[in-house]
Image (cartoon, rainbow, N blue to C red):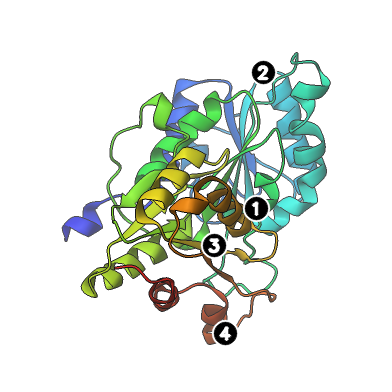
Amino acid sequence: MSASSEQPSYREAMREALREALREDERVLVMGEDVGRYGGSYAVTLGLLDEFGERRVRDTPLSELTFVGAGVGAAMAGMRPIVEIMTINFSLLALDQIVNTAAVARHMSGGQVDVPIVIRMASGGGRQVAAQHSHSLEAWYAHVPGISVMAPATVGDARWMLGAALADPDPVVIVEHSGLYNLRGPLGEPPPPDRAWRAAIARPGDDLTIVAYGGGVQTALAGAERLAEEGTGAEVLDLRVLRPLDVDAIVESAARTRRVLVVDEGWRTVGLSAEIAALVSDRAFYDLDAPVARLCGAEVPMPYAGHLERAAIPQVEDVVDAARRLGGG
């Protein structure tokens, strides 16, 4: 067995994070469609029902509006629910509970009501599940005050970010790219509390900055490896958290490398890439040697055919081509 195969997968790391949370705090419960007997749509919760029982790991009806609402109520009552939604498109059925209740309860109660709910959902394409199950809608949640949004891109973050999310008194959405569940890597050590919500330099470089998150980080890293063979040192900045953005990390890297490429599987129009480009232009305009470049998902419903799906999602060669056009090195 190779060293790589001995490392835990993203799926296993997330499962261990859930197990630790259930073991250490009796207020924590996991709930959602098929999280119990079936083990979750991506097998993240596999085995937790046998270990913790039906009181702590709860299969719910096929109604996101209902079970997310139940989770919000449980959080208001002092529990620490972790709600799993199969894919991010299904979360649209629960938007009223998330945006119009959970996100505003602290404000509307004058600070008297906390809503410490964590909502996990899979996002992104690349698995040929077509237009209704391949969305990258994380920007929708990052737009909403009162919600924090995490996007773990590594096995280590899959293992350790949940603890910071559970400690937050307000709602946290964790967006897990569906293409990462089989990724293997080191668990590492839990980050200190002051780093839990910060961006991380996944690969250092001096010639340009590639800003990415979630599944885009692996694409960016592979692109940076190719660029290094051509003599271009690309820094890959893993955002890790989409709200609140680590503005200082983005600006510092942009000012140092003087060129920025944003990789975002989401749609280009009114997306996260636009926010980051505007932020860099506002804060580091006079440090730039070129306009901020954006590489985004095609603005079409996700195709089912594999070759068309690949064409709709940023690929490694697209990162390399965009970086070449941007210059540097």
Q: Residues within 10 Å of mark 1 (few under 14, many from 20)?
A: some
Q: Which residue is mark 1?
A: 139
Mark closest to the chain's N terminus, 4 or 1: 1
Judge from the rendering whether residue 269 lies leftward or rightward of residue 251; answer left or right: right
Which quarter shows the C terminus? bottom left
In which quadrant of the rendered view does residue 4 lie?
bottom left
Query: Are the residues at dot 4 and dot 1 in contact (C-beta closer than 8 Å)?
Result: no
Judge from the rendering whether residue 235 lies leftward or rightward of residue 139; answer left or right: left
Q: Secondary structure at mark 1?
A: helix
The image shows residue 98 at horizontal and vertical percentages of 75, 39
Q: Residues within 10 Å of mark 2 (few under 14, many from 20)?
A: some
Amino acid of disc 2: Gly
The image shows residue 181 at horizontal and vertical percentages of 44, 57
Mark closest to the chain's N terminus, 2 or 1: 2
Which numbered marker is on residue 264? 3
Which numbered marker is on residue 308? 4
Q: Secondary structure at mark 4?
A: helix
In the rendered view, tell whether residue 65 sits above or below residue 110. below
Residue, far front: 286
Which quarter shows the N terminus? bottom left
The image shows residue 229 at horizontal and vertical percentages of 22, 73
Mark closest to the chain's N terminus, 2 or 3: 2
Q: Residue at x 33, y 51 (%)?
A: 202
